[in-house]
Image (tube, grey):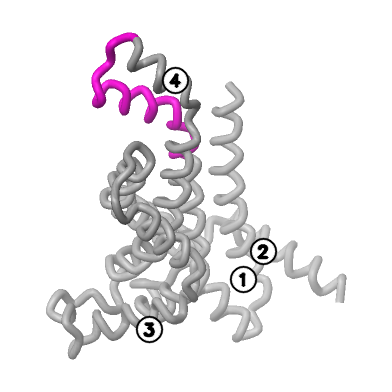
Amino acid sequence: MLGTILDAIQQALILILSGDQEVLAVTLRSISTSVLATSLSCIWGLPIAITMGLFSFRGKNLIRSLFNALLGIPTVALGLILYLLFSKSGPLGIFQLLYTPLGISIGQSVLITPILVSFASSAVESTDVEIKDLARTLGASDIQTGSIVIREALWGITLAVIASFNRAFAELGIAMMIGGNIRYVTRVLTTSIALETARGEIAFSIALAIILMAIVFAITGAINLLRKD
């Protein structure tokens, strides 16, 4: 068994180093859909997170509880809901998002928004109270104080964004149900790994898994190194 695994890893490395076009295409598609998903999530998620982190208002705890609950939503269930929404007979069918990379990105953005909001709002709230008090003592306005707090919480917000990207990048359920795993169109790393494993193409699956983990570790490692500097 060990010999089979080592042989598969060897074939996988050869496949990667040879610059296989299908491997490259699937990898680039995975990156592009996940980047777009993270960007969309940031557009509506960060304002919510910053508002929750900076201000106290009625219903804040309810909103926080909602986003915390959505952290554990099963991707298959969310994928089914989005499939029904995006299908031709669904309310969003007119936009023809089903079985498209854009549809995958939108689905992933919905999935990762609770992660972004929960982590980013916690980062803002955990900023030292003395910094806020000092800013107000020096005559800073509410907007200026908020800007100072956001700058202090920037690394926490950045980590929230990276965590959201990694979650989208490694996601399978939504990519499979919304994208359909169509070759040259919507096939991404996770759906390819599932497909090739079912086919018995272990070397190809391991190659894709190595790329998937390498990208996640590289991004996380780079962020950690920058944080130390």
Q: Which part of the image, by quadrant, shows the N terminus? A: bottom right
What number is the disc on residue 204?
Answer: 1
Q: Which residue is mark 4?
A: 131
Name the one closer to the observer, 7 or 210: 210
| Mark 3 lies on residue | 80
From the image, state whether disc 2 or disc 4 is nearer to you: 4
Q: Name, please, the residue furthest toward the front.
A: 58
- As for residue 131 lying within the magenta part, the answer is no
Marks 4 and 3 close (CB-CB < 8 Å): no
Q: Which residue is mark 2?
A: 12
Residue occupying image coordinates x 40% and y 22%: 132
Look at 61% across and 39% down and name the residue there.
221
Q: Nearer the viewer, residue 159 or 31?
A: 159
Residue 203 position by quadrant: bottom right
Mark 4 → mark 1, Cα distance in angstroms: 52 Å
Q: Earlier in the sequence, mark 4 or mark 1?
A: 4
Give the residue furthest to the right: 2
Residue 26 image offset from top left, x and y in percent:
45, 64
Q: Badge 4 local density, few (<14 within 10 Å), some, or many (20+)?
A: some
Q: Amino acid at mark 3?
A: Leu
Residue 97's place in the image compared with 166, above or below, is below
Closer mark to the observer between disc 1 and disc 3: 3
Rendered location of residue 57, percent (x, y): 29, 47
